[in-house]
Image (cartoon, rainbow, N blue to C red):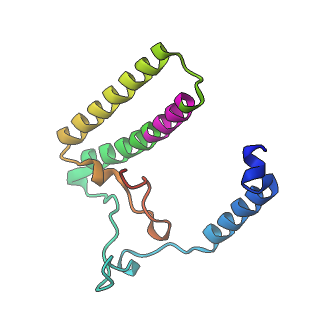
Amino acid sequence: MTADEERGGPDRRRAEVAAAAERAFRLLPAAPGDLPAPDGRASVPARRITADPDTVERDLMKLVLTLVELLRQLMERQALNRVDEGDLTEEEEERLGTTLMLLHDRMTGLCARYGLTMDDLNLDLGPLGTLLPPPE
């Protein structure tokens, strides 16, 4: 039995994607005051990039680092999938692991340089949630 058959086949997967897309298109952008607090008390302002002239360099770096972190996490997941499938030699696995660790260290260094934390890079997308998945 193939993986597609175990999950219900490609038709089921297409239906899931279509349903998710339909839900996404029905969503309206949330104003910062519309977001409920995690404990349900008062609304919490969304963490968004502000366009203050005094912090424009930091805000731009925050945006760039957010995109780089998103790509880094995607590359890491793809690398883990390739390792699990046995597509890589031991040398390629070592080189890939070293590269990903160096990239993470550089990201942490750049965040520190601009007064950011890795949590600051997780932008709030309103009703869609946060951009980056929660840390494991």
The residues colored magenta run 73-83
Q: Nearer the viewer, residue 135 or 105?
A: 135
118 shown above or below 87:
below
26 shown above or below 86:
below
Task: Please check the rendered image and state whether residue 111 is part of the magenta-colored stretch, yes or no.
Answer: no
At 71% from the left and 62% from the top, the residue drawn is 16
Quadrant assignment, res 108? top left
Q: Nearer the viewer, residue 96 or 35?
A: 96
Quadrant assignment, res 102? top left
Q: Nearer the viewer, residue 85 or 108?
A: 85
Task: Please check the rendered image and state whether residue 82 is part of the magenta-colored stretch, yes or no.
Answer: yes
At 22% from the left and 51% from the top, the residue drawn is 55
* Residue at the right extreme, as displayed: 11
Q: Left of 38 or right of it: where is 128?
A: right
At 58% from the left and 25% from the top, the residue drawn is 86
| Residue 103 image offset from top left, x and y in percent | 34, 30
Q: Quadrant of the N terminus?
A: top right
| Residue 101 image offset from top left, x and y in percent | 33, 29
